[in-house]
Image (spheres, helix red, strand yellow):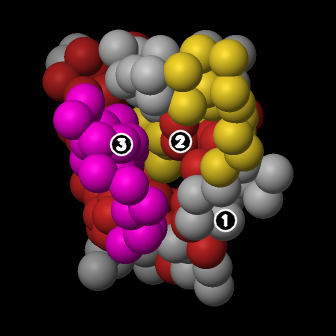
C-alpha cells in the first residue's frame, strides 16, 4: 500500500488534467507520465483478470471449428488509462473482437440479457436467438468498485507526492 498521508487527492477528471500538466512541466515529464499510467494500469489488472475469468466460465453450447469465442473475448479485456485529453480516467474495458466469426460486438452481446441473433451454420436462411452469460462483465466487479478506485488513487497520490517532494 502507498503512503497517502502527505497529500490526499480525489480522483476527478480535473485533478488528472492538473497532474498531467504538472508532469509535462517537469524535466522528465514524459517518463513520469509513463510511470503514472503504468502504475494506474497495474492497479486495475486484478479486475481485468476477474473479468477474463468470468467470461471463460461461460458455458459452451456447441462445438465450433472457428476461433474460440470465450478466449477471443478474454484476450480483448484490459485496463485503459488516460491522464490527459477530454475524458481522462482509468477503466477496465472489453474491446471489440474484430475478425471473430463476423461478431465484433461479442463482449457486449454476451453480457446482455437479450443476447444476439445469428444465422445457423451452413443455413443462412434460418436464424436463432442465443444468450451468453448475462452480466458476466458487470458482476466481475460487484462490490469491488471502491477497492479499485482506491488503488488508482494510491497510484495517483504516489505521483503527486513524488512531484511535491521534488519541489521542496
For disc 2, the marked residue is: 107
User: For the residues carrying marks 3 and 2, which lies nearer the camera in this image?
Assistant: 3
Q: CA distance from mark 3 to mark 2?
A: 9 Å
Seen from the viewer's position, the closer of residues 129 and 83 is 129
User: Is residue 42 among what the camera can see?
Assistant: yes
The secondary structure type at the circle numbered 2 is helix
Q: Left or right: 142 with respect to 151?
A: right
Q: Position of residue 151 (x, y in %)?
A: 43, 68
Q: Which residue is mark 3?
A: 69
Q: Could you tell me residue 76's position as x and y percent? A: 35, 36
In the visual, does 150 lie left or right of 53? right
For image coordinates 38% across by 62% down, the residue present is 60
Report helix, strand or loop for mark 3. Answer: helix
Which of the two discs, 1 and 2, labels the residue nearer the N terminus? 2
Estimate how packed mark 2 is, as few (under 14), some (14 to 19) or many (20 or more) residues with alpha carbons within 10 Å: many
Q: Residue at x 35, y 14 (%)?
A: 99
Q: Which residues are magenta?
A: 57-79
Q: Please indicate whether residue 148 sits to the left or right of residue 98 in the image.
A: right
Q: Is residue 92 covered in magenta?
A: no
Amino acid at each position: 500500500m502507498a503512503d497517502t498521508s502527505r497529500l490526499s487527492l480525489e480522483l476527478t477528471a480535473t485533478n488528472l488534467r492538473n497532474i498531467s500538466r504538472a508532469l509535462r512541466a517537469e524535466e522528465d515529464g514524459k517518463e513520469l507520465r509513463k510511470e503514472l499510467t503504468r502504475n494506474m494500469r497495474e492497479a486495475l489488472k486484478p479486475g481485468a483478470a476477474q473479468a477474463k475469468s468470468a467470461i471463460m466460465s461461460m458455458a459452451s453450447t456447441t462445438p465450433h471449428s472457428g476461433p474460440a469465442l470465450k478466449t477471443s473475448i478474454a484476450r480483448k479485456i484490459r485496463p485503459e488509462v488516460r491522464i490527459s485529453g477530454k475524458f481522462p480516467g482509468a477503466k477496465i474495458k472489453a474491446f471489440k473482437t474484430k475478425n471473430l466469426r463476423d461478431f465484433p460486438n461479442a463482449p457486449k452481446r454476451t453480457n446482455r440479457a437479450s443476447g444476439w441473433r445469428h444465422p445457423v451454420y451452413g443455413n443462412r436462411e434460418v436464424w436463432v436467438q442465443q444468450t451468453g452469460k448475462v452480466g458476466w462483465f458487470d458482476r466481475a466487479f460487484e462490490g469491488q468498485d471502491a477497492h479499485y478506485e482506491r488503488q488508482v488513487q494510491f497510484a495517483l497520490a504516489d505521483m503527486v507526492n513524488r512531484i511535491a517532494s521534488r519541489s521542496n
